Image (cartoon, grey):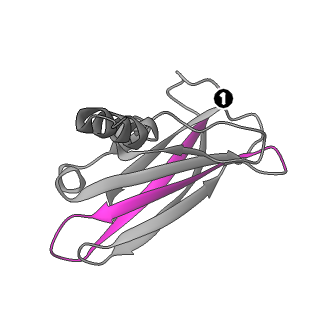
Amino acid sequence: MKTPIWALGFGAALLALGGCSTSPVSGDAGEATRYTVNNTETFQLLDKAVQATVACTGLIESVGTDGRLEVAVNVKNRDSRAQVIQVGCLFKRVPTALTGLEAPWQTVKLDAGATETVRFKSPADDARSYAVRVRLNR
């Protein structure tokens, strides 16, 4: 008995789409939670210039062996010219807080079309969320 072609196509589509997901991957302490570009609400572009030229291509958060929250953010220069930006991270004890523990701003030189990874570690072990912020170099 032959399997209809449409059934094979339908099965292949289910297998292909079954692996697509934008939800965070969770697991034991020490494992990273990864976010796709569609799930980056904790990424803030502070200047009009960076809003037009910088993008977040990924965020990875994990908890270090010392219990502190660690964040790695991929920033991409969408401009045809190199630019120098500053990337900072505000760690929060309560997710809805407007203030928190500030990690030092890091200056990053992005070549045209380049992507760089910037890493932060919370100053305290009670941080539960964060906001990555990007601005032009001052």
Q: Is residue 86 above or below residue 131?
A: below
Q: Residue at x 25, y 39 (%)?
A: 5
Magenta-drawn segment? 66-93
44 magenta-colored = no
Whole-percent x, y for residue 116 in the image: 42, 69
User: In what element is the residue under mark 1?
Assistant: loop
Please provide percent x and percent y for residue 11.
37, 36
Q: Which of 53 and 5 is in front in this view?
A: 5
Type of amino acid at the residue the image marks with label 1: Arg
Task: Tell me if residue 73 is in the magenta stretch.
Answer: yes
Name, please, the residue furthest toward the front.
1
- When the figure is inspected, residue 62 is found, relative to residue 21, above or below; the finding is below
Question: Which residue is located at x 55 percent, y 50 percent?
Answer: 60
- Tell me the crowding category of disc 1: few under 14, some 14 to 19, or many 20 or more residues within 10 angstroms, Cα based: some
Magenta portion: prevailing SS class = strand
Question: How many callouts does the rendering have?
Answer: 1
Tell me: 41 left or right of 129.
Answer: left
The answer to whether residue 102 is left or right of residue 2 is right
Q: Label 1 belongs to which residue?
A: 93
Quarter assignment of residue 87 = bottom left
In the image, what residue occupies the spot 43% across and 59% down?
Answer: 74
Name the outermost residue toward the right: 66
Image position, residue 12 (x, y; %): 36, 42
Q: Residue at x 33, y 37 (%)?
A: 2
Of the 4 image quadrants, the one containing the C terminus is: bottom left
Say which quarter of the image contains residue 113. bottom left
Above or below residue 99? Residue 137 is below
Left or right, 98 with respect to 69, comes to left
Q: Quadrant of the N terminus?
A: top left
Q: Quadrant of residue 69?
A: top right
In percent of width and height, residue 46 lies at: 30, 46
